[in-house]
Amino acid sequence: MQKRNLSSRQKLILTYMNGKHSVVPGKELAERLGVSTRTVRFAVSEMNDLLREDGISVDAVSGKGYRLSVRDRERFHELISDREIIHTKEDRIVYLIMRFISSDDWVNLSELEDDIFVSRTTLENDIREIRKRICEHEPYIMMKRKNNAILLEDDEMKKRNVLLHLYSESWDFDSREGISFRNGLADREIMEEIRLALIEMLREYEIDLDDYGMVNMKIAVSLIYSRNIEGHRLYNAGADKRYGICRKAVDHLLDNLRRSWEIELEEADYTWLADWLERLTVLGLNQREYESVARKAGRECERIADRLTAELQMMFGVAFPDDEIFRTQLLLGVQAFRNQQISTQAQSRFSTDLLEKNYAFLGDVARYMMDRLSELTGKSFRVSENNWLLPVLCSAAERRERQLREKITVVVVSHVNDGLTQYMVDNLYKLFGTRCRITAVVPVHDRRAALALKPSFVITTVRMQLFGENGIPSVVSSPIVTEEEMIRIDSLLQRVERSVLHEGLPLPIDTYLGRGGELKADRKSTTEDLIREAYHLWKKNGIVSPDAETGVDGFRYILLRGDDFLIYRAGDITETTCFTKISVDRSIALDKFRSIRNLYIGLISANDRKLLPAFVGELDFMGKTSDFDGTVHY
């Protein structure tokens, strides 16, 4: 088939859109690639001309963006494969690991420089990263260096575990053929035979696996086939624990396949696969009760999960008491991380990245959790995996919020007829039903009944002073609930949400902002520049000692609403919590974040650390925009 010379930018566009499964706005693509929307349009147009004969196109959807259309999934993966063009550091590292593992002899570094078109300095940096990932962490494979060449130790089990992790990131389920892989493991007939054999095995032995577990087993069996065909035999896979039903299932599976393939397998192949299947069965439990998961995961995983839970409350003020689902999901996450069975497939990464935009604070918490998991288990993870636990946190936060929202009660006081009143209530349910609970509808003449219900606030069709006298805010609306009235209700509801959903601050947020003062920044400012300027101001205002270090170590970051950005450090550097507001004439970019208009740099004392969610909530609320002038009736 004719070779297509796609640029690295075009490959990134295809890869990103393949993970989205929806119409992608041109602005989103431009931000992802760090280019203009005009450059995106040009790249798409040129790419469509190149790929027309391959049945692949990026179609413009009027007023919405672009949609990816793929008729031949296998050809698509050939085109975006990184085997021919390596355009990111991560691509180079994966290529180098594959190259080292596949070679039984010393790999010459000078030849590698020519193969991937990099300098010796870049190559040495990549090798250091590889050492960190697979030599200094699991699977602790030894890398030998002799002058200008490198050789990995001849440990087949460690090599298979590395390959299993790499291949688990490069599969796709969006095709008529089912699961396909960007970097081919075996030919299509062998892969289909493995798939059918696995399905039969799972059914016969009543083993429950999720899709990720199924993919992992397909990769593992494919590796057994391909590595044996290439002459890489596995002679030692550790002690055979005779994994009960899992070992019996694996015996049945591999006995049938080796007869079909007409190859000999080692006992260690059976042991290695049974061990992997046993670990995967924890992730596939139909019954997700905590006790069942704990028995499978083991006491060490429980200990790590309990420690993380305690640290979240101490470090971030994040707690989900009595949330059995969170405890179970976290324990499953710890077990998967220890076994290096975390899913980082492209579509999952894109979904998790989108979650981080909506839950920026929890994204920071998730990054902390991954760092601590690495420290506590001795396992490594990639930068792309640093928010892997974010969905667990977001789900727990949503459940907690739903519980708290039950406390936000609204009473409707209406003087209009029953039909209009019901129309009004239905409108309110449609607009605000997920954010509060409408507990009663009372007539104006019986408005004291509304007071007896002690609502969070009242929505009334007439202006009344009675509620204000009792400290209950009210807002006036017609039965139609016009746009202006909707904005009024939303503004009042936001105020109530701040008091119910977040722990209150002991002082107004303006007090903390006043302590930190204000600064201005230009478009060329870096994160380091702004933190140094903030330190200078804090020293001047007596917030920190004159000899305090001004480095960036210990600072964390959160993207807030309205293109605002928070950089903070919590701990014992100060006894006085403060936030410095830094404004810019135009938007600036910091690290991977663009279009930042306001920036807050904060120091949070050890005593105030537990208030971190409240600080984030208050600063986040300041980023919200509303046309409402703030008038509320009391």
Image (tube, helix red, strand yellow):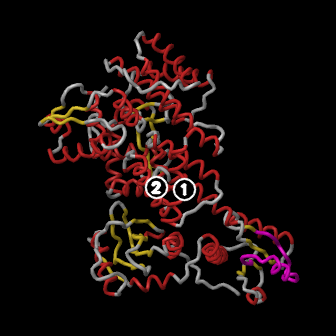
Q: Residues within 10 Å of mark 2 (few under 14, many from 20)?
A: many
> What kind of residue is marked 2?
Met
Q: Is residue 628 magenta?
A: no
> What kind of residue is marked 1?
Leu
Left or right relative to 1: residue 59: right
Dot 2 corresponds to which residue? 369
Which of the two discs, 2 and 1, labels the residue nearer the N terminus?
Answer: 2
Give percent across and percent down for residue 225: 40, 20
Give percent across and percent down for residue 23: 49, 49
Dot 1 corresponds to which residue? 393
Q: Is residue 415 visible?
A: yes
**Looking at the image, which residue is at 43% across and 56% down?**
367
Residues under labels 2 and 1: Cα distance? Answer: 10 Å
Q: Which region is colored magenta? A: 438-458
Q: Residues within 10 Å of mark 1 (few under 14, many from 20)?
A: many
In the rendered image, which quarter contains the C terminus? bottom right
Seen from the viewer's position, the closer of residues 237 and 587 is: 237
In the rendered image, which quarter contains the N terminus? top left
Seen from the viewer's position, the closer of residues 129 and 293 is: 293
Residue 223 vertical position relative to residue 615 in the rendered view, above or below: above
**Looking at the image, which residue is at 59% across and 80% down?**
628
Give percent across and percent down for residue 29: 39, 53
| Contact (Cβ within 8 Å) of mark 2 with mark 1 | yes
Determine the image quadrant of residue 580. bottom left
Seen from the viewer's position, the closer of residues 441 and 366 is: 366
Q: Is residue 457 magenta?
A: yes
Give percent across and percent down for residue 525: 28, 72
Dot 1 falls on a residue whose secondary structure is helix
Indicate which label's residue lies in the foreground, 2 or 1: 2
Residue 463 vertical position relative to residue 305 in the rendered view, above or below: below
Seen from the viewer's position, the closer of residues 167 and 266 is: 266
